[in-house]
C-alpha cells in the first residue's frame, strides 16, 4: 500500500511537460483522487476488508500445502490428506467470494470516481471564459475527457486494486515466510532491494513518456476535430493529402513516444521478473540443501516456496501496475490542470442585485480593453450612454471592436479599466448569471444544436411551452419553413444545423431570442443571411421584439440600421461619431465613406 502512495505522490514539476492551461507547480495526484473517494468511504472500507479476507485466505493455502506434504504425502496418511483437501477447498471458496466482492466494489469505485472527475472537469470548463477556449484547441480538451479519463478509470478501477492486493499479499507472504524459515527469508529480503531498483529508476521514465504520449494523443484529437468539422473547406480546397500528411506525422509522433514508453515498460517488467525468479531459484537451492541436512521439513520448504512464488508474483504485478499507475498519474495531471485553470471572470463575493424589473439603460465609462493574448487595446476608452428602450446601431469597419463591445457587455472578458453600468449598477458587482439573464444574443453565425427544432428554440427559455415556442417561431417568420420540414418541430437538425440553410438557421436563432424575452437585445448582423423577402419578414418580427427593449445592433449594411434611434460609428476601438443616418451623412466622413461603399446615397433613403 505504501508503494502506490509513493508512486502517486512522486510527481515533480520537472516531470510535467507541455502545460497549457495552468502552469503547475506540483500536482498531488493521490490526494486529488482520494478526495473523490471520500464520499464513498463505506464502499472503500468494504472493498479493503474483502481484499484482506481474500489475501489471508490465499496465504493460508500455504499452510494447506505444508500440511499436505508433511501430514499427507510424507506421513502416507490418506485420511488426513482428504481432510486437508477439504480444508483447501473451503479456503478457496472463501477467497473466491472475497475476490467477487472486492472486484465488484473496486471496479464500481473506479467508474464512480471517473464519473465524478468528468463532472467536475466539465462543470469547471463551463465556467471558463471564452479567453480560455480561444487559446485551447477543443479537440485537445476533448481528448483529456476521453483518453485521459479512460486511462485513469482503468487504473482506479483495476490497477490500484491489483497494487493493493499485491502489496497485502507480499507483506503477508513475507510474514509467513519468516515464520517458516528465518534464514531463507533473510536471503529473499536481500534480493528485494535488487528488484525495486528497476521499479524506481524505470518507473519515472515510464511516467514521463506516458505524459508525453497523452499530450501527443491530445494533438491528434485536436487535428481530427478541426479537419472533420471543416470537411467542406478541406475537400473544396483539395487539402486532403496535406491533412493526411500532417495526421500521419502526428500518428507517428504518438507511435514514437509510445515506443519509448513501451521499451521502458518492457525492461521494467522483464527485469523484475528475471530478478524475482532468479532469487527464487537461489533460495530453492539453499532450501533444498537445508531439507537434505534435515534443518527443515519438505513440507516447510514447500510452504516457503509457495509463499515465495506468491510474493514474487505479487511483486511482478506491482511492477506491472506501477507503470500503469505512472501512466495514469500523467493522465490525472492533465485533468487536474483543466480543473485548476483559474476562472478569469471571477464572481464577486457579495454580489449586488439588479432591480427586479430592468429598464435596460447602459452606460460605458472610460471602457478600455485588450484581449489577454495581445497587449494592444482594441477598445480605447469608450464613453457611451444608451437609454432604456433605445435602438442603437454600431457600425464601423471590420476589426473596429463592435463584437468586442458585445463581449464586454456580457462580461465574457474583464475590461482593463473603466466600467459598464446596467440601470446604474456596475455589472462587475452582480453575478454573471444575473447579468447575462438580461441579454438575448443573436450572434453573427447562428448556433444550432444537434437536436430538434423545438429544443433548439427552447434553448432560449428552458421552461417554455410548445405553444410559446411556436409563437416565437411565427414572430421570427420561421414557422412556415419548420412546418415543411419532414417532422415539423420534431425534425432533428443535424450537427451544427447542417440540414438548414443559412437564413433558416438565422430565423431559428431569432426565434430563440424572441422566446428568451430579455430586456436587452444584442443583434450581431442578425439578418445578414436572409434573402430580401425573408429579411423583410424577419424585420417585422424583430421590430415587434425590439418594442420597449434596449437594442444594440451590429450592422455591416446600412439598410438594417436606418431605423435606429442612433448610429454609433466605431473606428479602431474608439467612438468617432454618433447621430442619426441623416446627421452622420452630414457630419462624419467615416460614415459617409461607409455609406457610399454600401452603394447608398443620402437621397436613396
Ligand atoms: N479572441 C481574440 N483575441 C485577440 N484579439 C482578438 C480576439 N477577437 C478579436 N480580436 C481583435 O480585436 C479587434 C476587434 O475585433 P472585433 O471582432 O471586435 O471587430 P468587429 O468590429 O466586430 O469586426 P467585424 O465587423 O469584422 O466582426 C480586431 O483587431 C481583432 O483582431
Image (cartoon, rainbow, N blue to C red):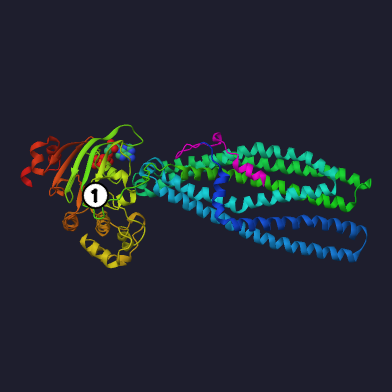
Residue placed furthest toward the top: 375
The residue segment tinted magenta is: 1-24
Which residue is more in the foreground, 350 or 493? 350
Q: Position of residue 307 (x, y in %)?
A: 79, 50
Residue 151 visible? The answer is: no
Q: Position of residue 127 (x, y in %)?
A: 39, 48
Which residue is more in the foreground, 396 or 391? 391
Number of on-image labels: 1
Q: Give the residue displayed 73% in from the left and 40% down from the top.
A: 195
Which residue is more in the foreground, 443 or 43? 43
Left or right, residue 274 beside residue 290: left
Within the image, what quadrant is residue 59 found in?
Answer: bottom right
Label 1 packing within 10 angstroms: few (<14), some (14-19), many (20+) = many
Within the image, what quadrant is residue 400 found in?
Answer: top left
Which residue is more in the foreground, 593 or 364? 364
Quick check: 119 above or below 131? below
Does the beta carbon of the residue at mark 1 sit less than 8 Å from ligand 1?
no
Q: Name the residue tied to disc 1.
A: 522
Q: Give the residue displayed 75% in from the left and 62% down from the top.
A: 92
Magenta stretch: residue 71 in it?
no
Magenta stretch: residue 5 in it?
yes
Q: Position of residue 568 (x, y in %)?
A: 17, 41
Residue placed furthest toward the left: 603
Q: Position of residue 420 (x, y in %)?
A: 26, 42
Local SS, label 1: strand
Residue 288 visible? The answer is: yes
Q: Quadrant of ligand 1?
A: top left
Amino acid at each position: 500500500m505504501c508503494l502506490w502512495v509513493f508512486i502517486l505522490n512522486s510527481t515533480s514539476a520537472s516531470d510535467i511537460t507541455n502545460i497549457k492551461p495552468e502552469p503547475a507547480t506540483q500536482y498531488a495526484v493521490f490526494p486529488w483522487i482520494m478526495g473523490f473517494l471520500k464520499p464513498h468511504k463505506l464502499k472503500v472500507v468494504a472493498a479493503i476488508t474483502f481484499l484482506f479476507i481474500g489475501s489471508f485466505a490465499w496465504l493460508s493455502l500455504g499452510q494447506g500445502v505444508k500440511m499436505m506434504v508433511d501430514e499427507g504425502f510424507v506421513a502416507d496418511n490418506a485420511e488426513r490428506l482428504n481432510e486437508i483437501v477439504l480444508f483447501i477447498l473451503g479456503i478457496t471458496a472463501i477467497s473466491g467470494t472475497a475476490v467477487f466482492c472486492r472486484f465488484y466494489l473496486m471496479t464500481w469505485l473506479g467508474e464512480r470516481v471517473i464519473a465524478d472527475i468528468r463532472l467536475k472537469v466539465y462543470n469547471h470548463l463551463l465556467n471558463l471564459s471564452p479567453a480560455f477556449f480561444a487559446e485551447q484547441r477543443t479537440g485537445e480538451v476533448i481528448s483529456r475527457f476521453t483518453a485521459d479519463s479512460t486511462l485513469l478509470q482503468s487504473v482506479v478501477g483495476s490497477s490500484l486494486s491489483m497494487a493493493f492486493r499485491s502489496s497485502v499479499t507480499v507483506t503477508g507472504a513475507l510474514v509467513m515466510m519468516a515464520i517458516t524459515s528465518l534464514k531463507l527469508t533473510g536471503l529473499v529480503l536481500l534480493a528485494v532491494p535488487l528488484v525495486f531498483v528497476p521499479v524506481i529508476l524505470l518507473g519515472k521514465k515510464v511516467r514521463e513518456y506516458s505524459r508525453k504520449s497523452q499530450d501527443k494523443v491530445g494533438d491528434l484529437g485536436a487535428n481530427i476535430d478541426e479537419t472533420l468539422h471543416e470537411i467542406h473547406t478541406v475537400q473544396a480546397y483539395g487539402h486532403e493529402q496535406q491533412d493526411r500528411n500532417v495526421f500521419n506525422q502526428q500518428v507517428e509522433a504518438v507511435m514514437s513516444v509510445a515506443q519509448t514508453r513501451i521499451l521502458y515498460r518492457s525492461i521494467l517488467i522483464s527485469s523484475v521478473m528475471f530478478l524475482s525468479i532468479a532469487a527464487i531459484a537461489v533460495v530453492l537451492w539453499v532450501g533444498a540443501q537445508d531439507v537434505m541436512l534435515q534443518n527443515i521439513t519438505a513440507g516447510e520448504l514447500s510452504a516457503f516456496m509457495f509463499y515465495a512464488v506468491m510474493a514474487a508474483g505479487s511483486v511482478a504485478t506491482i511492477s506491472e501496475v506501477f507503470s500503469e499507475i505512472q501512466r495514469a498519474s500523467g493522465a490525472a495531471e492533465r485533468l487536474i490542470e483543466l480543473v485548476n485553470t483559474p476562472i478569469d471572470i471571477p464572481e464577486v463575493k457579495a454580489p449586488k442585485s439588479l432591480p427586479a424589473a430592468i429598464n435596460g439603460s447602459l452606460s460605458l465609462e472610460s471602457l478600455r480593453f485588450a484581449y489577454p493574448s495581445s497587449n494592444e487595446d482594441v477598445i480605447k476608452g469608450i464613453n457611451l450612454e444608451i437609454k432604456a428602450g433605445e435602438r442603437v446601431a454600431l457600425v464601423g469597419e471590420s476589426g473596429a471592436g463592435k463584437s468586442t463591445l458585445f463581449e464586454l457587455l456580457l462580461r465574457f472578458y474583464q475590461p482593463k479599466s473603466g466600467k459598464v453600468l446596467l440601470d446604474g449598477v456596475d455589472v462587475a458587482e452582480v453575478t454573471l448569471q444575473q447579468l447575462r439573464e438580461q441579454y438575448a444574443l443573436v450572434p453573427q453565425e447562428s448556433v444550432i444544436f444537434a437536436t430538434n427544432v423545438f429544443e433548439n428554440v427552447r434553448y432560449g427559455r428552458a421552461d417554455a411551452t410548445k405553444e410559446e415556442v411556436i409563437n416565437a417561431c411565427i414572430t421570427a417568420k420561421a414557422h412556415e419553413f419548420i412546418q415543411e420540414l419532414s417532422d415539423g418541430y420534431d425534425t432533428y437538425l443535424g450537427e451544427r444545423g447542417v440540414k438548414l440553410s443559412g437564413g433558416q438557421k438565422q430565423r431559428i436563432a431569432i426565434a430563440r431570442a424572441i422566446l428568451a424575452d430579455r430586456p436587452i437585445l444584442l443583434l450581431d448582423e442578425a439578418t445578414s443571411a436572409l434573402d430580401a423577402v425573408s429579411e423583410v419578414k424577419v424585420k417585422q418580427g424583430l421590430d415587434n421584439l425590439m418594442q420597449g427593449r434596449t437594442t444594440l445592433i451590429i450592422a455591416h449594411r446600412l439598410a438594417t440600421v436606418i431605423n435606429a434611434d442612433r448610429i454609433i460609428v466605431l473606428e479602431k476601438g474608439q467612438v468617432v461619431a454618433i447621430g442619426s443616418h441623416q446627421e452622420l451623412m452630414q457630419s462624419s466622413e467615416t460614415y459617409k465613406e461607409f455609406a457610399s461603399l454600401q452603394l447608398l446615397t443620402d437621397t436613396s433613403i
